[in-house]
Image (tube, grey):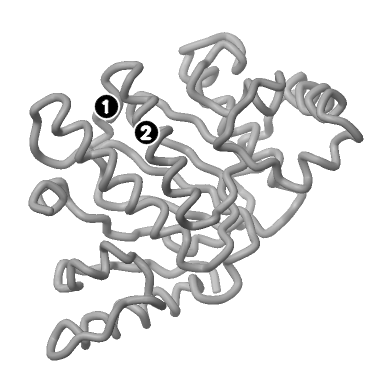
Amino acid sequence: MTGVAVWLSWSTPHRFWNKCTHAVCPPASGTGNRSQGRTRRAIQSAGLRSGSSGYAHHIVQRGHNRAACFFGEEDYQTYRHWLGEALANTGAALHAYVLMTNHVHLLVTPKAAEDIPQLVITIGRRYVQTINKTYRRTGTLWDSRYKSSLIQTDTYLLRYQRYIELNPVRADMVRHPGEYAWSSYRANGLGANDPLLSPHTLYLELGASPDSQQAAYRELFRTGLDEAALRAYPKRPVARQVMIPSARWIMAK
């Protein structure tokens, strides 16, 4: 299977969004029950039930119409807070991330197949609630769809990790990834403490100690990143188009 688009429709009961999993939705009656059944089958057909847990996923979430979703330093801290809460609740492991002005990249390995949609929707809901309250704004903040691609080949995992952490360099925001405060590079490459991160096995295999792992990781950044090869890599999009709740619904909760 090369990829299936998954749509969580507005007819899906709100409690589905609160739980955000095809496995634990409480039973319902009438049209809600039929809607839940359709949603479960859609997620299962996309491969979210089997074959996606235990593998790293590259998640990209963008601001609505590519507009900014971070407006000040405290907003990045707020996002990190809700990201940490979502990771703790799902048990998913975060290996790399970058928070850009108008989008976010995450490299995550879920424990269970439903962890990815639960993670993204939980962060999106909580973060938008906080931002709308802080700035006295209404309306949507995130694009209604996020991308989640399964990285099944170990050869490419550290390349994608570098790709994520080099985003600020490619955007001409900094000259070196270590200069950017809102990414995982300072932890992975320089040994800074970041409680959000859980190093991937491939990262740990870079050396026998944290110092040697960081040195080997920094060495990877001395060579150019073959972005054409990454684009050509046959990723498996397990949730390429997944609807997330709008800000209007979020503010109503």
> Which mark sits nearer the N-terminus, 1 or 2?
1
Specify the quadrant of the image occupied by residue 218: top right
Image quarter of the N terminus: bottom right
Q: Position of residue 211 (x, y in %)?
A: 83, 23
In the image, taking residue 250 as reference, residue 120 lies left or right, namely right
Q: Which amino acid does the dot numbered 1 rest on?
A: Ala
* Image quadrant assignment for residue 151: bottom right
Question: Residue at image x 58%, y 25%?
Answer: 166
* Picture coordinates of residue 22, whole percent (x, y): 37, 75
Q: Given the current orientation, which residue lies at the most extreme right position? A: 208
Residue 40's place in the image compared with 226, above or below, is: below
- Does 190 sit left or right of 64 as displayed? right
Q: In which quarter of the image is residue 135?
A: top left
In the displayed image of the protein, which residue is found farthest to the bottom?
Answer: 30
Q: Mark 2 points at which residue?
A: 79
Tell me the amino acid under the disc marked 2: Tyr
Residue 40 at x, y percent in the picture = 35, 79
Secondary structure type for disc 1: loop
Nearer to us in this view, 243 or 108: 108
Cα gap from disc 1 to disc 2, whole angstroms:
13 Å
Q: Residue at x 69, y 41 (%)?
A: 199
Estimate how packed mark 2 is, as few (under 14), some (14 to 19) or many (20 or more) residues with alpha carbons within 10 Å: many
Q: Position of residue 179 (x, y in %)?
A: 57, 11
Q: Residue 68 carries which label?
A: 1
Label of residue 102 in the image:
none
Quadrant of image for the C terminus: bottom left
Task: Name the residue: 33% across, 39% down.
Answer: 62
Camera-near label (1 vs 2) is 2
Q: Residue at the location (38% across, 40% down)?
A: 82
